[in-house]
Image: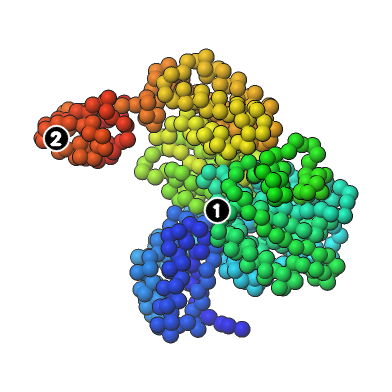
Amino acid sequence: MELYRAHVLICGGTGCTSSGSAKLIEAMERELKNNGLENEVKVVKTGCFGLCALGPVMIVYPEGCFYSHITEEDIPEIVSEHLVKGRIVTRLLYQETVHPEDNSIRSLNHTKFYEKQMRVALRNCGVINPENIEEYIAVDGYEALGRVLTQMTPEEVIDVISRSGLRGRGGAGFPTGKKWSFAAASPGPVKYVCCNADEGDPGAFMDRSVLEGDPHAVIEAMAIAGYAIGAHQGYIYVRAEYPIAIHRLEIAIKQAREYGFLGKNIFDSGFDFDIELRFGAGAFVCGEETALMTSIEGHRGEPRVRPPFPAVKGLFGKPTVLNNVETYANIPQIFVKGPEWFASIGTEKSHGTKVFALVGKITNTGLVEIPMGTTLREIIEDIGGGIPNGKKFKAAQTGGPSGGCIPASLIDTPIDYDNLIAIGSMMGSGGLIVMDEDTCMVDIAKFFLEFTVDESCGKCTACRVGTRRLLEMLEKITSGNATMDDLTEMEELCYYIKENSLCGLGQTAPNPVLSTLRYFRDEYEAHIKEKRCPAGVCKKLIGYEIIADNCKGCTACARVCPVGAISGEVKKPHSIDKTKCIKCGACIEKCKFSAIVKK
């Protein structure tokens, strides 16, 4: 057994990898060798720590020092000072981990970002090396599968999941135990277990991070699901744009087979189960369960009419259970700690925790996991660190293109399935986009409609044609050519699309429009009646002017104008030719005298 006096954990998730963490690992190992410490200090490549805004990040144990924004040039100093001389490099520390009174190092759990979080699905992300199965085993990995196969019947397994109150984390929130029981009750010797890892919401990276940081948890949970419903084959449908997740899944599946956790006669129980990967090409519609299964079968990813539901007739026409990555990531802990433990977390109808990708106009962008019932204010102000640059919070968008916008007036709403639906949004897979006062809500609705129009599979007319017409109406509004009759017609079209689309993509596509109409109708009316964008975002409704009294004639604005729309003599007020101006905003960014205004 190897014993080390220190462990250096370096994030190997996509975010930190894109910032150069792989080079940090190489540099750290090189410096340790140069200082003769390669047998005393262990470098561990982990998954995402969550605080993506501070990446690349590194934690040195046993002190628990959280170093942030690390560069390759910082590594020699960390090794020579911290690991050789025992002197912490305070300038590189995440300052919230430094106690203000005595400069001692405090646990990450006592920082604002982490103290209100509860990591269940993310429990091993940033803690273990996801490419080493022995590290997963060391933190109770595969203990749940062992208990299930050697001590429980399939019926008892489903009962535990039902009593835990776990609901699907992929969007709809359907009770997991009920879904498994339907599949278990369906007759036939061949059944399947599928994992939806085709995360397609703009700004979402929850499932990717779980697969990168803790792939064995998903593998273990799928094997448990297979035993519960009588399936012997599983498929993980993961998008090809996730190369790190795919690489670690391939390693994890190979290791699980070698250790006997996949394959024949697992735990000498007589139960056989194996998993294969299938790659998605980035089609958003393949996040819908029947379209996903159609794609696995080798056909174009299009949804099927339901019923029959997948639990009766799914993959290859056989009974199938499909859950998403986060749902599976919770399951091993439910068996290790008990269903009552899981049910005690959250609210009466929404048990457990929820992982969110916190992005947008927020200080602490990253991955957060909070107990159900945590308020939006706590997420934004406490965990997220508030809105940067002194701006005001305006809205938050949850649920991706299928969700809705939550206004500032509802910032104290507890986040759970039912509350979000009641205010016109939805949980979705877990994207949470924060917007400040400079955001145009009409433009936001148009952004999500552009996405769904591009991603519609085209199978049903309501979605294929309806979303296109809806987008045209939004474009008409943002260009200043709409009337109030158009607004009425647009709202009617939203409900038509919701009621007549074949699958969830079309049925939920109008949600961003309906929620912004509900809470920000005044912005729509300003675009239509006053031909004005209150946020100054919609280009066709804004113009730039130079205030003569403020202009110093420095010519800075004229030099950056890409179309030569600004003219004037040195040290004399300039002017903008509005017929040439393309409203790029370069001039207003360059002006140091607040002489250029947007109107």
Q: Quadrant of residue 310?
A: top right
Q: Nearer the viewer, mark 1 or mark 2?
A: 1
Question: Looking at the image, which is closer to me, 109 or 204?
Answer: 204
Q: How far apart are marks 1 and 2 (CA)?
A: 49 Å
Residue 276 is labelled as none
Residue 521 appears left or right of 1 = left
Residue 114, image x, y percentages: 52, 56
Q: Which label was assigned to residue 241?
A: 1
Residue 553, disc:
2
Q: Can residue 64 be seen in this view?
A: no
Q: Which corner quadrant of the image does residue 480 belong to?
A: top left
Q: In this view, does 247 lie above or below 494?
A: below
Q: Count of labels shown?
A: 2
Q: Between residues 341 and 542, which one lies in front from this camera angle?
A: 542
Residue at image point 69% right, 43% down: 291
Kind of residue indicated by mark 2? Gly
**Visual colour scheme:** rainbow
